[in-house]
Amino acid sequence: MELADIAIKFGLIIIIFLISLVVAMYSTYAERKIAAFFQDRVGPNRAGPFGILQPLADGAKMFMKEEIIPTNATPFLFIVGPSLAILTACIGSAVIPWGQNLVVGGRTIPLQVTDINVGILYIFGVVSLGVYGVMIGGWASNNKYSLLGAIRAASQNISYEISMGLSIIALLMVTGTLSLGEIAQQQHGWHWNVLYQPVGFLLFMICAFAETNRTPFDLPECETELVGGYHTEYSSMKLGFYLFAEYINMFISSAVMATLYWGGYNYPGMDWVTAHTGPAIGPLIGTAVFFAKIFLFIFFFMWVRWTIPRFRYDQLMDLGWKILIPLAIANIVVTGIVITFFS
Amino acid sequence: MESLSNKKKQLVIKPPNFWERAYLPAIVHGLSITMSHFFKKPVTIQYPDEKREFSENYRGLHSLKRDENGAERCTACGLCALSCPAEAITMIAAERQKGEEHLYREEKYAAVYEINMLRCIFCGLCEEACPKEAIYLDGDIVQSDYLRKDFIYGKDKLVEPPLNQ
C-alpha cells in the first residue's frame, strides 16, 4: 500500500467520523424540531436562527455539568459503560459503502473504509457489543432501577437479534454474499432488494427499532417505571455519551437499512448521470442520494417515535418471539422455494 | 328497563379481526394522523415576544388612577382594603399640605399604598368598592421575581404615570 493510499484512507475515516458525529448532533436538534411539528409546537428557536445552534448549546451544557460518580458505584465500570456505548456506535460505519469508486486524477478512491467479505456479520457483532455499554453502565451504577433498565435492554436486544439475523438470511439467499460493498453493487439502478424482500425489510426495520432502543421499543429508558432507565445515575457528558450513542446508532442503522434493502447509493438513471458528469462527480451524486435515503429513514424513526406509544414488556416479548421469529422463518422458506423453482 | 330517550346503544365488543391484530394498518393510520399535524400551524404563543390578547374585562395588575388634572384620586378611605378577601391591601393615610393640591385631589391621601401580589387573587372587589374610581385592575400580568418582598408593590409601581408624560 502506498503512502498516498494510507493518507486517503485516513482522510476518509476522519470524514466519515465527522459526518456521523455531526449527523448525530443534528439528529438531536431534528428530533426536537420534528417532535414539535408533530405536536403543533415551534420547537427550539432561541439559540441562533431557527435554533440551529441548539446542539452546541446542549453539548456545552453537558460538559459544564457536575461529574457525579455515586459512592456505591464501581468507578472503573461506571466510566467504561458510556465509553463502550459510544465506541461501538462509532465503529459500525467502517463497512458501509458510501458511494461508488471515485476516480480523481487517475487515482481510484473507494468510498468505503474497508470492504471485508463478512460485512454484515461485522455489523451484527458491533451492534450486539453495543448492548454491553448499556449493561455495564446499568450494573456499575449499583441502582436497582438502572439494573432493571439494563436487563430490559439486554433481553430485548437478544430477542430481537434472532429475528434480525433470520430476516437477513433470506436477504443473503437472494444476494449470495455477505459483503456490503457487493450487496450495494448488485442493486444497480432500480434493482433494490426491498422489491424482492419486502417482508424481510419490514422485519429488519422492526428489529432495527428494537436494537437502537427507539420507540416503541424504548423500554430500557422508561421514566415512569425506572426513574430514568439504565442511565439514571449518570450525569454530565457520560450521560451525553449514552444519549449521543443512541443517535449515532440510529444513523448507522439507517445507513445499513438503506444499503441492504433500499439500494444504497444506487438510483434509477445513475448510469446516464455518471456518463454525463464524469467519474469524479457522478459517485458523489450517488453518495448524496444515499444520504437522502438515510435522512428519510432517520425521519421515519422520529415519525414513529412521536406516533406510537411504548410496548408493555410482555407485548414486546410476544412480538419478538411469537410473531417476528416465525414470520422470519416463513420468509426464509418462501424465499428458498421461489429461488429453487423459479430461477 | 325501557329506554326513555331511545338513544341507548348496546356495546358489543367484537374480537379483532386479522387486519386489526396485524397492527400494521393501525400503525399506518396513526402515522397518517401525526403527519397531518406536521403541516399544521403551531399554536404556540411565544410569550414575551408575542402576547395573547386579553379579553376586555381581564383583571390584571392594579393601577391607581389620576384625575383629569393629574392629581391622585385615592383618598385612603380604606374601603378597598376592607373589601379585599385576601387582605392583600394595606395603606397609611396622610393629610394634604398646602401647595400639594396638584398632587392629591382631596384633603386626605395615601402616603403608603401597598398590594401584596402574592396574596392578591385578582377578584376585582377593590375596584368595585372604590367610591372614587381610583383603582382599576386594567394592567398586565404580574411579573415574576426572586424574592417575596419584591412582590409587595408600592405606590411607585401602582400609580399611573403623570399625565403630561
Image: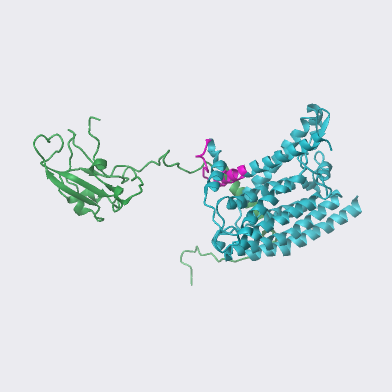
Q: Residue at x 71, y 39 (%)?
A: A14
Instruction: Look at the image and say whether residue A284 sits in the magenta stretch.
Output: no
Q: Is residue A42 above or below residue A125?
A: above
In the picture, the quarter occupied by the N terminus of chain A is: top right
A43 displayed left or right of A139: left
Q: Nearer the viewer, residue A22 or A250?
A: A22
A325 displayed left or right of B3: right
Instruction: Look at the image and say whether residue A40 sits in the magenta stretch.
Output: yes
Name the spot of residue A89 as percent of width and height, x first.
Answer: 69, 50
Q: Which chain is cyan?
A: A
Q: Is residue A240 visible?
A: yes
Q: Is residue B15 visible?
A: no
Q: Quadrant of residue A21?
A: top right
Region in magenta: A25-48
Look at the image and give the colour of chain B.
green
Q: Residue at x 25, y 52 (%)?
A: B88
